[in-house]
Amino acid sequence: MHIEIVTLFPGLLRGALDYGVLGRALERGLVSVGLEDPRSHTSDAHRTVDDRPYGGGPGMVLKPEPLCAAITAAATRVPAGSARIALSAQGQLLTQAGVAELARLPGLVLVAGRYEGIDERVLELMIDRELSIGDYVLSGGELAALVLLDALARLQPGALGDERSSAEESFAAGLLEGPHYTRPEVFMGRRVPQVLSSGDHAAIRRWRCKQSIGRTWLKRPELIGRAPLDETQRALLQEFLLEGSVRVTGEQTTGSR
Ligand code: ADE
């Protein structure tokens, strides 16, 4: 997958590309990234990329000419069938299902806005969709582009050490993951759940499944509303709740976990 990022701060992105799963995916050529700076598409002495908003008001707006030229240049380097996405707090909320859908594309042009925003005509003429990474306002789309890039890179076949990891993790099945433990077996008086060192793989799978459902119910109950539990899962949830002596009182939940 080839991803082009249009940004006024290419250095900010470059600095983040060397690390972890994303760094490895780039090194192995599973993902490639290009950066395009609208400032290099200006022709005035000040290399102006922004201007005052028509109608007045605070802040500056990204001028259409350098931004369009940068998007056009970036678009020549992505394969046919790629999408052009602007990162913006006004966009559709990014979800794991949305990331998985984008990961099937051959490439993307990601446009990171700055200042008060992008001239609307650029969005109308050059952008397929707007995406937001959450209901809060960032000072630019760069960090959002990095979030999306990271989430995409780890879904590329071969990016994770163990291919099961991305299928089993939080949100892959619409549920959160259960807890993880490593040595020592006892830490500050707390023992790793016995079943995990039992060697009984069926029991471990069942326990993990139960923890996953239980955690989701406790931490993100709205996720269960979106993907209702089947009968087996409901029984596991019941067991989880009984074990933790969780009391359900209307909207409120308390427990000993
Ligand atoms: N730019 C500013 N805020 C943003 C957000 N929440 N998501 C994506 N891009 C943004």
Image: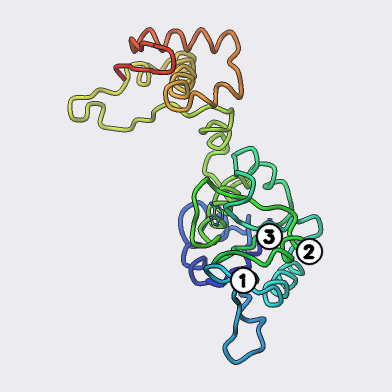
The amino acid at mark 3 is His
In depth, the one of 228 and 108 nearer the eye is 228
Residue 120 left/right relative to 237: right
Q: Which mark is residue 7?
A: none
| Label 3 or label 1, whichever comes before in sequence order | 3
Nearer the camera: disc 3 or disc 2: 2
Per the image, label 3 sits on a secondary structure element best described as strand
Residue 242 left/right relative to 183: right
Q: Which residue is mark 1?
A: 53
Residue beneath the point at 57% across and 21% down: 225
The amino acid at mark 2 is Leu
The image quadrant of residue 56 is bottom right
Whole-angstrom CA distance, mark 2 to mark 1, is 19 Å
Q: Position of residue 242 (x, y in %)?
A: 38, 7
User: Are there few (<14), some (14-19), or many (20+) residues within 10 Å of tag 1?
Assistant: some
Contact between labelled residues 2 and 3, with CB atoms less than 8 Å apart: no
**Colour scheme in the image?**
rainbow
Residue 167 left/right relative to 130: left
Per the image, label 1 sits on a secondary structure element best described as loop
Per the image, label 2 sits on a secondary structure element best described as helix
Q: Position of residue 115 (x, y in %)?
A: 54, 67
The residue at the far bottom in this view is 45
| Label 2 or label 1, whichever comes before in sequence order | 1
The amino acid at mark 1 is Pro
Contact between labelled residues 1 and 2, with CB atoms less than 8 Å apart: no
Q: Which mark is residue 2?
A: 3
Q: Which residue is mark 2?
A: 125
| Label 3 or label 2, whichever comes before in sequence order | 3
Residue beneath the point at 72% across and 46% down: 104
Residue beneath the point at 60% across and 43% down: 93
Vertical arrangement, residue 175 with respect to residue 149, above or below: above
